[in-house]
Image (cartoon, rainbow, N blue to C red):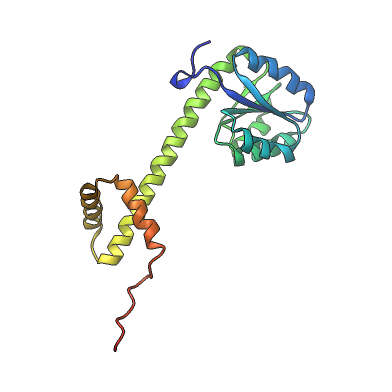
Amino acid sequence: MAPLRDGTDHLRVLIANERKDRLDLVVPIVAGLGHEVIAREIEVADVGPVTARERPDVALVGLGASSQHALDLIDKIVREAACPVIALLHEPDPAFVKEAAKRGVFAYISDNEVDDWQSSIDIVLRRFAEYHDLQGAFGRRATIERAKGILMERHAIDEGSAFEMLRERSRVDNRKLLDLAAAVVDGHRLLPRHPPAPQTP
């Protein structure tokens, strides 16, 4: 088996399906790929807490008798997991795939194409990592923009001057620009919107 991204070739996998017989079929396939099944869930009410506790690397959700049950499983896992969710189909179902995509699945695979599972998982893990890197970049940019806005308001300066103020303070204090921006944003929440007027004796 080809190694996964960053040389990882062993994943902790959660599988979920309302049909126990389907779970029993998927477990040996996942194990045969060299991965560990850390949890197998049937009930929607249980899958969220198990996902939060076990922190799987990837989750496979099978479409059983009820597409709504599978969609509810996906919802719960996506809310709790810091991992990609893959829908597992035993026959084509475009309507289910469309609804599953709305709920956050990264891909779907067919149990008729078991030989392709590992390649699909590799691709999903890479796309999921890129997605999180992009989310992080947007978050960092938003923090810096908020800090600039605070400095512009407090010091009555323009955007360029606010950024230079951040950059200069970052250099002087030997702190990362992002850390300094976060400190400005966090500290701003504790300060009054406008300085209090001086009190007369």
Q: Residue furthest bottom?
A: 201
Residue 176 rendering spot, x and y as whole percentages = 29, 44
Q: How many marks?
A: 0
The C terminus: image quadrant: bottom left
**Residue in view at x 20 percent, y 49 percent:** 172
Residue 177 rendering spot, x and y as whole percentages = 29, 47
Between 172 and 132, the residue placed more toward the observer is 172
Between 22 and 181, the residue placed more toward the observer is 181
Quadrant in the rendering for residue 146: bottom left
Residue 24 rendering spot, x and y as whole percentages = 75, 19
Instruction: Please indicate whether residue 172 sits to the left or right of residue 200 in the image.
Output: left
Residue 99 visible, this orientation: no
Q: Residue furthest front?
A: 201
**Residue in view at x 31 percent, y 51 percent:** 180
Q: Is 14 above or below relative to 34?
A: below
Between 109 and 165, the residue placed more toward the observer is 165
Residue 130 rendering spot, x and y as whole percentages = 44, 31
Q: Is 128 above or below relative to 3?
A: below
Quadrant in the rendering for residue 187: bottom left
Quadrant in the rendering for residue 99: top right
Residue 141 visible, this orientation: yes
Q: Is 183 above or below relative to 137?
A: below
**Residue in view at x 65 percent, y 22 percent:** 37
Instruction: Please indicate whether residue 30 sits to the left or right of residue 4 in the image.
Output: right
**Residue in view at x 55 percent, y 20 percent:** 120
